[in-house]
Image: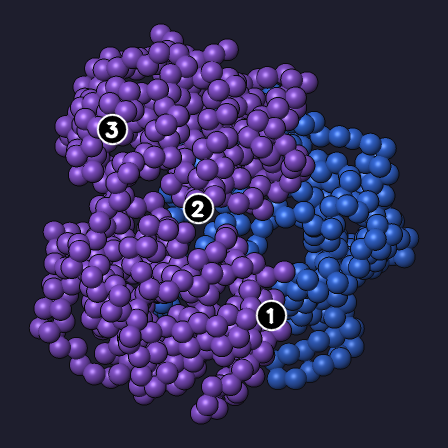
Chain colours: A purple, B blue
Amino acid sequence: MGGARVEAKDFGWHHPGRHSPAVSGLSLVIEPGQKVLLLGPSGAGKSTFLHALAGVIHDDDGETALGELLVDGVPAEDSHGTVGMMQQDPESSVILAKVGDDVAFGPENLQVPRDEIWPRVRASLDAVGLGELLLEHSTSALSGGQKQRLGLAGILAMQPRVLLLDEPTANLDPEGVLEVRDAVIAAQRAIGATMIVIEHRVSVWAQFMDRVIVLSPGGGISHDGSPDQVLVDARDELIAAGVWVPDYSPQASTAHRASDSGAGAGAELLRGRALAVTREQPTRKMMRARKKLARSPEPVSLPLPLRPVTDSIDVSVNAGEHLSIMGVNGAGKSTLALTLAGLQLAANGILYATDELRDSAHWDVASWSPEELVSRIGLVFQEPEHQFLTANVRAELEFGPRQVAKARKQAVDEKDLAQRTEALMRRLRLDHVADANPFTLSGGEKRRLSVATALATAPRILILDEPTFGQDANTWAELVNLLHELMTQGTAVVSVTHDLDFVEALGGRTLYLGTHS
Amino acid sequence: MSINIFDARPEYNTWLGKINPGIKLLVATVVTLLLVFTVDAVTGTVALVLEMIALVIAGFKPFNLLARFWPILLATLLSGWGTAILAEKTGTVLLDFAYITITTGSLASGVGIMMRGLAMTMPALMLMLTTDPTDLGDSLAQTYKLPARFVLAALAALRLVGIMFSEWNTLGAARRARGVGARNGVLGTAKSVCGQVFTLLVQAIRRGTRLAMTMEARGFGAGQRTWARVPTHSSKDLVFALTWLAIPVIAYSISLYAGTLKLVFGSF
């Protein structure tokens, strides 16, 4: 076993119909067993290189692949089974419904005899720390970190000689990040495979790596050497590219940070007392009973027979203040966010809008109509694409205000709306993509657009679910600055997050949720 | 809420759950096909009653089963009603109201169609309820030699369907948070549902593409492959096959003996 030698000779990849190649002029040799961290700005073709090396993209017209890409002297396309690859999304690491079948999938395809498969499956599961699981265990019952480790076990069972990891920890919470990283490092040490990792969060991986290679956006390599050397030499270049280099935390401008201590003095907007949140949907009967009770002019408690995720939450959301909601996976953070945003009924307790927030609406946030909601509370989901509704960025930003005007039976002041939309696009640097389809934007642009759509209806409260997940350092800093600006203007910001740096940068109060027992 | 087709169901641990899925599929198909040819009330009723007895013995509650799959029950009731109205009017008139005339003869035809419909769907329900899709996949690919590429791709896709269900709910909440659902009339609602479907499809295609890459990186599609698990057979399979195949045979025999047997291509 051991590692394989990876060699690229003037390698490139030119997707048919694109102006310029995704990768070009790449020449490198990676010796067997070497551990390489691959960095570079988005668009430099890191993923394309990995996909080509794994043999999962194909040169159908004979003009797409340029140069040569060899694994132990064999073209990468023909080296199935030698190369194992893991992707970012834990859901795409899992193929079959049962843990055992999923790990056995690779060996089966490589025509490993049946008697050899099961020992391999057990050894691989042990190697990634999932040895406790039954082979019949359901793969959908696993956490994100466990799914990635299962994917790793599936790769190890094929006894690969090259491990390719494409941002394997970008979609995981801090606990999952370490769990997967440690499993990868231990597995690599055990089998001695050559390893190439792409990862924005450099500090997670750098100390375990032999070598760091930085791809340049114009093609080829801009830096190549030991982690210590490259991370010093290429530091400015990497920071500019949005890479999270060690010991560097993108700073919000100091003018905003000064306002930290002054924030939090605003009026109370939303209040929850002894709140129990649930993921279950109420039945029609419960909804009817609730509607009747919710007519009460004063806030009342409306217990529902739904299983709570967590209970006894006391929470208040104040103008101009940041509130972070933290806690372990499954503690009900996102469920609380949905409840605060009026999109999910609480199982028990009271949640009400204060006079300051409700205006002409009812105290009961959950009974608000969509247009009452969007003009008061904006909720930004973790996955921006889930909230895109129209065919271009401009229409996306105009959607909310138009809905509100329609519901209030008012005519839309087209000139005013166009002006406000332009201003919002400039502020979030989206003016250059005004007519682009939201689905075609870059990751950072999508995140900014999803925040902008919530801001378009000028809500008093902005709730964000894991806003910094998988974002590069540049988008992260922009987001922090923008939220500071909003708070200075009196908007309340609530964020569900695992990101301690983010919490520190925004200040305010923190609500920790424990699991319900 | 999430619906997962692969979640282990208690029915998997019943006697029927332990029968080889390939045998179950074959027997269920044969029983259903045999019953296609009958149209009289006696054959269908006898077959249905025998199937129910077989299910009760295997530890099921057939009426609960029908209640769970109520759309099928409704469909067979409607087809029976339709037949009763349209069938040849023989015997004495039972109901004569406006355009609707039902006689003893047409009623018997209606009941026959309905009973046959239920008797034909029971084996399929039994198969669906007691069979783990992964095991069925094993049988289809290894016993019946269906292309492995097709069977495994279908299993992987089926897993994504479960994910799509929960994603649909998330999408609904995400869109409500944007103000979708404000009073827009029927057209607006239809437009909004189409949009939600579009987003779901975009996500599904992306996820599917990524999953295909993972599968290919694990050597899928290269041709020949081995199988870590083999479909198992036991003497129970034989008992099962004989019992269920006997059902249509007995039903036809009784009907023939009673002189009521009527087939789609004429009576005896």
Position of A423 compared to B216: left or right? left
Q: Position of residue A139 (x, y in %)?
A: 58, 41
**Labels 1, 2: one chain:** yes
Q: What amino acid is at disc 1?
A: Leu
Q: Position of residue A480 (x, y in %)?
A: 25, 55
Secondary structure at badge 2 equals: loop
Residue position marked by numbered label 3 in the rendering: A231
If you read the primary sequence from the N terminus, does the residue marked by circle 3 or circle 1 appear first? Answer: 3
Within-10-Å neighbours for mark 2: few <14, some 14–19, many 20+: some
Position of B98 compared to A178: left or right? right
Give the quadrant of residue B91. bottom right
Closest to the camera, between mark 1 and mark 2, is 2
Q: Position of residue A334 (x, y in %)?
A: 45, 60
Q: CA distance from mark 1 to mark 2?
A: 28 Å
Give the quadrant of residue A304. bottom right
Secondary structure at badge 3 equals: helix
